[in-house]
Image: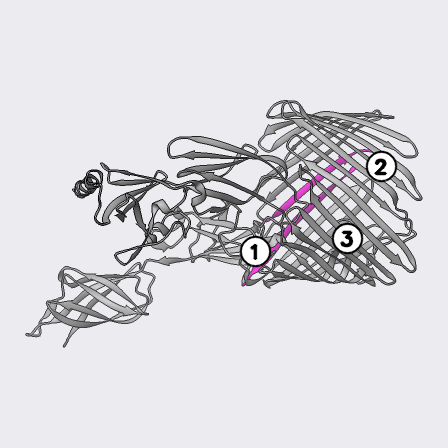
Amino acid sequence: MRCACLSIIFSMIMFQLLHTGTVFAADLIVLKMVLNGEDKGEFFMVLSDDNDIWIKKDDLGRTELLEGLGSDTFFDGEIYVPLSSISGLLFRIYQDEAALDITAPPHLFKKQYVDASVDRSHELGSADATSGFLNYYGGYSRFDEFEIFNFSGEMGIGTGNYLARSTFSYSRSEETVKAARLISDLTITDSKNLRTITAGDVTASSGPFGSCKLLGGLKISRNYALSPYLIKYPSLNLSGTAESPSEVEVYLNDTLARRETLSPGEFEFNDLPPTGGAGTARIVIRDIYGRERAVSTPYYISDRLLKKGLHEYSYSLGFIRENFGTKNFDYGRAAFLGYHDFGLSDNFRAGLSSEASKALINIGLRGSALVPKGGVVSAAVSCSRNMGTSGANWSAGYAYVSRNFNLNVSLQSASRGYSSVSMKPSDDKAKLMVSNSVGFGWDRAGFITAAYTYFDTYAAGTTSITAVSYNKALSNDTSFFLNAIQVRDVETKQEITLGLRVYLGQRTSGAVSYSGGKGSDIKRAEIQKSPPTGTGFGYRAGVENTRSRNNAEGHLSYQNRYGMYKAELSDRPGGSGYRISYAGGMGFIGESVFFGRPVTDSFAKVKVGDIEGVRVYSYNNEIGKTDSHGEVIIPDLQSFNENRIDIEPDDVPITYSIRSLTRHITPAFRSGSVVEFDVDKMRAVSGTVYIMDEKGVEAPVQYTIMRIETEGKIIEGMVGSDGGFYIEDLPPGGYRAKITFKEKTCIADISVPESEDTVKDLGKVACEAVQ
């Protein structure tokens, strides 16, 4: 009816415009706005005396059009925008439908930004309880009358963002007994600033072309592992335009990466995470009219670069650890190693490095840049001075990676007097080192890779290594491989290996191969089965035939929730014998202690009230059932990542209510956390309530509501026939219940005792009338 009235009014106005030639005043009308094919609803508009349409500025601002378009006009105390004042905009009135159809070019719409990066949906949680673990390994081996016993362990204790850890080893043979402390450190996690501070035995580095040393001291470093969903290298941004409401799909190398429904206008997808190397991005736009168009864009992404504005660094200061593994506290001279890289732009990464020790200083510069047509070129130079001897080292390289082709070229050279924390001027070093590799192929033809490495050292002379490999999938279960290598130094050595790999299903695979070269002729056959994630067996067996004899070896492993067990047997010249070993772990979270496999990362205690026998899952893998305290331990959570934990609803008795069946936890590094599922036992009280009438006779209170105020909330219970009442979720204690009955109000004192009964009968309760 409304549309019919609007159509009549609209027709009368249009008749006057078309036949009189004169409009005495602008008119206020109601029209449905359709913007680039999208219905925006009905609005009051002004039909001006020059056949223009004015739209209220506030209504225009509610659309996706840019703000500030056109000129302002006042009508009846409101600000309107004449559509004719917006350059490039077309409009048309449809009389029968009382509709205004507007067509605007994409540049008049607000730009839409779609964040395509992957981010955690839950905040990083620190350990909410003091926790600790002890991993232990024990093994015994006997080969050709030589026997040895090994034992090693790792223990740690943590709370919040602090983790103290220490490792040790012990070995005993007929000749020696060795016991040593290995690594001891304290790690502080600063997740807000993506930074890790480590004190104790730290692995210090001055970057990719520098030294790496074990120090006893302090290390401060950027740790992007604290935010595993953050892409630290430059990602991909793609833009396009939609002329009408459209479904937009983004494909990276023909794999769907994102699908969005967008309004008309320009759009941009930010932080798309493609695989590294060269590729093609394709945007497919399907509008509401069924039209489809696609735009393809080549790209090159490299993890050798650093996103603009990001930093990557490591600074270590301490004393060099000597005789590691044999002496417990042998620390030598003081040393400093550090580097700091900057993402100056998405196409250029620059870095500084530095090393210093007694009478030594080493300073370096390095950088990596994106080649416009693909690939990354890198270069580094460092200069040193050690006790009056100066030296320099430089390197340069280029890398290109794509789906079907990859190329790596690198050169490096050091002067005779170059030195660092790990290299003295007198040590031999490469005058020139060349390392090249190239690979190409397709799924049908297979993939071939060739590599060439050349060393020319000051003292040892020259060495060159040439290697070629080829891999081809013959079927979904079978692949062929070929490897050939030639080493030239004092003499030339050559070897070629070819064979087949076969996947047999159920985590089982096998391989046969043949290796031939100067003085060698080896045939091998092997079959292996990897152990399952949970409880089960795994094995590996192989046999090898040479010109002189047959060699055989076998490995059998078994693991359950309490540990990992292995047995190895070998029959070969100089190594016939066996080895047996066991690895396990124990830990505690608060007052709960558990035994299981080695604790390699974070762990958690899951508590489901006090309910026994509830199955608990981690990413749909059953971990175990809750014990008599309603607890179960998950020993292998991924730190800094989201971990999904579920419980089986069918295992929760119907007398309990549970608020959620799923929890997400993002634990800190190697920490123990408590994950509680809130369950409440459904408890209720019942009884009968009565009031004394004017004659002093007990009369039941019937068909009303009993209200009890407790802890800032009101609990209601039903009162039925003969005064029978029923109230749920009322904790033990004393309460006053207010009841309105026959326009009278009375108060009943209710006492709820401690009880394990699902429904506790309170008997008869008196309700005293009040004014």
Amino acid type at circle 2 is Tyr
Which residue position holds label 1? Answer: 594
Amino acid type at circle 1 is Phe
Q: Which of the two discs, 2 and 3, sits closer to the camera?
A: 3
Q: Residues within 10 Å of mark 1 (few under 14, many from 20)?
A: some
Assess whether mark 2 and mark 1 are in contact (beta carbons under 8 angstroms).
no
Residue 599 appears in the rendering? no
Q: Earlier in the sequence, mark 1 or mark 3?
A: 3
Residue at left offset 10%, top offset 67%: 742
Between 106 and 123, the one nearer to me in the picture? 106
Q: Which residues are magenta?
A: 562-590
Q: Decide if residue 523 is on the left or right side of residue 6.
A: right
Which residue position holds label 3? Answer: 365
Amino acid type at circle 3 is Leu
Between 230 and 595, the one nearer to me in the picture? 230
Q: Decide if residue 486 is on the left or right side of residue 529.
A: right
Between 660 and 373, the one nearer to me in the picture? 373
Which residue position holds label 2? Answer: 454
Q: Earlier in the sequence, mark 1 or mark 2?
A: 2
The image position of residue 340, as x and y in percent, is: 71, 56
